[in-house]
Image (cartoon, rainbow, N blue to C red):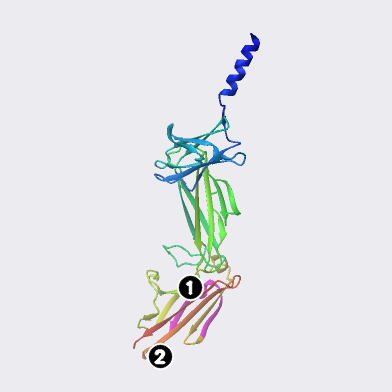
Amino acid sequence: MKKIILSTLFVLSTALPSVAFANSIISIDTKGPIQPDGQVTVQVSSSVIDLGGATIAWSVDGQPMSEDIGLTSMKVTVGALGEQTHVTAITTLFGRIYRNDIVLSPSIMDVLWEAQTAVPPFFHGKALPSHMSIVKTLAIPFFGAVATDTLPSYSWKKDRTISLGEGVGNNSVQTLGAWQDSTLPLSIDAKLGDQAVAQTLRIPSFVPSAYFYELSPTQGVLTTNALQNTFMKDGSELSLLAVPYGIANSERSRSKVQYDWTANGTNILSGFGQNLERIRLSRVNDPNNAGKIGLDFSAQNAVNVMQLAKGSFTWLFNNK
């Protein structure tokens, strides 16, 4: 009698396939970002067994969706920001059943960046990066209505391989801009619990250039509009500020930038120091004649000579 019972139990255990959580044999993941109200591809894969002959059944939030041999991926429509979608893949192969589960929670992330380069006072735009200038970034992820005291963990990479920093709360990094007329590729991953979001961007590198602004004795720098190629203004004097967009502030503040001013082909001012970005032109010795003064300006980073900003314009004037 005991032998019969043992034999029956053995038959039952071999006839019913076992269900195993397949974390170590089959993995499940997604392709691409999980955007709110968008579609994402969920896939299963294995380096141990061939899934080409396996029967794979998919379900979303407990509802059966599709089933077929070798059906290793499926597109899933997710909900709003932070809304969870539960996806299950049941894989049957050689009498064994493997179960994989994944929770999809749409998240988004904004990545802001700004170069540490020259701009006019009270400038409302973005400072642009130039050859090997410092670029500061800031990641702002949105995981939906998640109640937690935990800070997100970040991972920053350049060219997808070079680590720029990682860790909890590390939402900002500084790096060097790309070569001239090239781009800086960055990838950022942010995780909060079982939620994750990734973003990639390419930050362009611009050629520095100089623009001129009038200095008013009463209003200061008139930054509303840069002076055009030709500027007509009567009077005996004209004060200017030349802004070398793209020149690194690090060298600019340490007097490591060389400035050169030329008027009608003659050098009138040269040297180092940020104060040389300002100049006052005068025609008090001959104020009654109409004429013009052609100005050329250059600012070159003495540490990084690839940062060279140039600009020129002409001051036209009539009789005083």
Q: Position of residue 242 (x, y in %)?
A: 46, 74
- Is 100 colored magenta in this rendering? no
Q: Which mark is residue 173?
A: none
The residue where tag 1 is placed is 209
- In this view, the residue in front, 10 or 173, is 10
Q: CA distance from mark 2 to mark 1?
A: 32 Å
Instruction: Give above or below for 154 relative to 103.
Output: below
Disc number lying in front (2 or 1):
1
> Are the residues flagged by discs 2 and 1 in contact, CB closer than 8 Å?
no
Judge left or right: residue 135 versus residue 1.
left
Residue appearing at x 60%, y 19% in the figure: 11
Instruction: Give above or below for 61 relative to 220.
Output: above
Q: Position of residue 255 (x, y in %)?
A: 57, 71
In the displayed orientation, state which residue is furthest to the right: 3
Q: Which residues are magenta?
A: 267-283
Residue appearing at x 53%, y 53% in the figure: 187
- In this view, the residue in front, 31 or 55, is 55
Q: Classify mark 1: helix, strand or loop.
A: strand
Residue 264 visible in rendering: yes
Q: Position of residue 63 (x, y in %)?
A: 42, 32
Instruction: Give above or below for 19 relative to 113.
Output: above
Q: Quadrant of the N terminus?
A: top right
The residue where tag 2 is placed is 286
In the displayed orientation, state which residue is furthest to the top: 1
Q: Amino acid at mark 2?
A: Asp
Judge left or right: residue 318 versus residue 200.
left
Mark 1, other Cα within 10 Å: few <14 / some 14–19 / many ≥20: some
Q: Position of residue 259 (x, y in %)?
A: 54, 77
- In this view, the residue in front, 102 or 164, is 102
Q: Amino acid at mark 1?
A: Ser
Mark before the other along the chain sequence, 2 or 1? 1
